[in-house]
Amino acid sequence: RPTLVIVGGPPGAGKTTVAAGLAEKLGWAVIRSDQVRREVVGADPWGGSPEWLSAPFSSAVTQGTYAAMVRRASVLLGTGESLILDATWATEPPPALAATAAAETGSAFVALHCRAPLAVAERRVARRIAAGAAISTATVNIVRRLAGSFAPWPSAQPIDSAAAIAETLTQALSAVRGATTATPRPSEHTARPRPASAATSRSSSRIEFQCPPFALSSATITSSCG
């Protein structure tokens, strides 16, 4: 049966590296929130460093991005294809929506929470900005803000993404392979409390957006929302 993996964590925690490593090892598709966010916005708003509450990072765009990711995942899972969703997954309801999509398609589901010390995450993001090649637009300031608002995620498997890449991927692969033999039921998904600091900037409503068509393939999806 197909498997849906969501890989989350604050910017700089290594989630995109983990998602890409899993995709390479398992031959699964990846949908990245950074790319889908651009599609939801409908233009390229990245002319400079984004502000925390600027349009591309508003509650409406963020929730619309997750909704688009989950819709696409449902289609792929329905065809029997396993895939990985690479996004922050900082608060509910997006993780619950992903778990429901997996349950409705009879798929295994696993959530991975990448964790790294704040100083490590800041250095990674600073290097990424300096290189200027990454699609992610998170800034060091956003890393710091998310570090204080990321909700507890008890249903996710913690991944020490500050470790060596090989060790980190071993942890992630073990969690994913375990999910193929034991699938949580929808009722077992523990809703995450929403921190007060995130409550004012996150919407709990599911917002539907129309997104461009996408290709159904087992290759990594790079034009498909994190």
Image (spheres, rainbow, N blue to C red):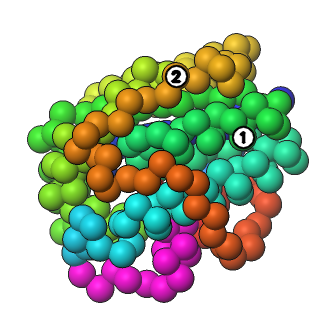
Foreground residue, 127 or 142?
142
> Which residue, given by chain and number where applicable, does mark 1 sit on?
101
Which residue is rendered at x = 55% and y = 19% of the image?
174
For this orientation, the residue located farthest to the right is: 79
Where on the picture, by quarter, is residue 192?
A: top left
| Residue 107 position in % (x across, y down) | 77, 31
Foreground residue, 116 or 145?
145
Badge nearest the viewer, 1 or 2: 2
Q: Secondary structure at mark 1?
A: helix
Asked if 171 appears above or below 202 in the picture, the reply is above
| Residue 1 position in % (x across, y down) | 83, 29
Which residue is rendered at x = 61% and y = 17% of the image?
188
Please say whether residue 44 is one of the residues in the magenta stretch: yes
Callout 2: 10 Å neighbours few (<14), some, many (20+)? some
| Residue 58 position in % (x across, y down) | 37, 66
Q: Secondary structure at mark 2?
A: loop
Range of magenta residues: 36-48
Asked if 81 appears above or below 167 in the picture, the reply is below
Residue 70 at least partly seen: yes
Foreground residue, 213 or 209?
209
> Which residue, given by chain and number where applicable, does mark 2 sit on?
190
| Residue 5 position in % (x across, y down) | 60, 36
The mark found on residue 14 in the picture is none
Asked if 142 appears above or below 23 in the picture, the reply is below
Residue type of the residue flagged with mark 1 = Ala
Foreground residue, 203 or 69?
203
